[in-house]
Image: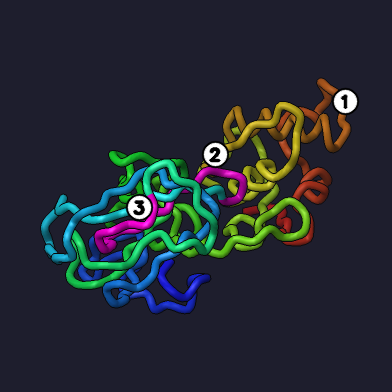
Amino acid sequence: MAQPLPAGKLSVGTGWRYSKGGKHAAFDYPVEIGTSVFAVQDGVVLACNDGVTNKSQPGVVGAKSNWILLGIMHGGQKVSVLYQHLSPGLLVSKGQQVKAGQQIAKSGSSGNATGPHLHVAAMWGHRTTSTRYDYLINIGPKEKEPNGTAQNEICIFPPSLVYTAKKASGRVTSTSPFAAGDVFLDKLHFGSKDSDSVRRLQFVLNNVKLVQGRNLKVSGNYDIDTKNEATKWQLQIDKCKPGTLSADGNIGPKQAAKLFGKSYTLKAHS
């Protein structure tokens, strides 16, 4: 982020959509050229581009710019943070490991920009040069601003959700959108789709140490992978007997109370 770090003290210009309704799905911070930009978390530079002069080219789609794609971990999952419109002379290179708060660049006005600002986007997965704009894919004209994961299951919005994550006591990350909230018990079964309750379940399971455990995609879909991880929890943590209804991969009310903890509010029906 630009000075100061952590984020949240900087004003945001453009957010979820442009003023005319076009998709943006990122934060634009209007800062002067040369403002220090820092790594939001420990991570690795997945890709970057340098050497473009600070000449704004508003409306020129595909105009070259200076950018950094930083791979970090958030909530036990891989996340990519894109810094765009930087000044030439990046302070990092591809493959370099960086620490949270380490200066990586200076803000600029390169590429498709109306003026000096820092564009920051966040998305699930460690992205590549060719997929660094995937956070914009399949955002419909009527999709409302999310608070967590967009419907494309790629874009994290607001991106500041990954800026200042700190480990809380226990297994969750305090600033994750799925580290607290309502959990509807009727959604905690195989086959549920596009449910924040399932996203919260997937998030919690990702933060439990299980033998041969795997990292789940926080998709909101109670798929076979989610069912398998829930079964592992039932067998290993809840000590249920194999082959019983309590170890079938669907989370019941009593198990939900053990699994979710005080940060969540359990409700019977959605």
Q: How is the image coloured?
A: rainbow
Q: Amino acid at mark 3?
A: Ile
Give the quarter of the image for residue 104: bottom left
The answer to whether residue 58 is magenta is no
Would you place residue 71 above or below residue 245 in this image?
Answer: below
Residue of label 1: 241
In the image, which residues are magenta? Answer: 74-92
| Residue 34 at x, y percent in the picture | 30, 72
Residue of label 3: 68
Nearer to us of marks 3 and 1 is: 3
The answer to whether residue 90 is magenta is yes
Label 2, residues with CA under 10 Å away: few <14, some 14-19, many ≥20: some
Residue beneath the point at 72% across and 60% down:
168
| Residue 146 at x, y percent in the picture | 44, 60
Classify residue 82 as left or right of residue 100: left
In depth, the one of 123 and 119 nearer the eye is 119
Label 3, residues with CA under 10 Å away: few <14, some 14-19, many ≥20: many
Residue beneath the point at 37% across and 47% down:
93
Q: Is residue 150 visible?
A: no
Residue of label 2: 217
The Cα–Cα distance between marks 2 and 1, rounded to whole angstroms, is 27 Å
Task: Determine whether the residue tagged by mark 1 lies in a helix, strand or loop.
Answer: loop
Q: Amino acid at mark 2?
A: Lys
Marking on residue 19: none
Marks 3 & 2, CB-CB < 8 Å contact: no
Nearer to us of marks 3 and 2 is: 3
Mark 3 or mark 1, earlier in chain: 3
Q: Quadrant of the C terminus?
A: bottom right
| Residue 159 at x, y percent in the picture | 44, 61
Give the quarter of the image for residue 58: bottom left
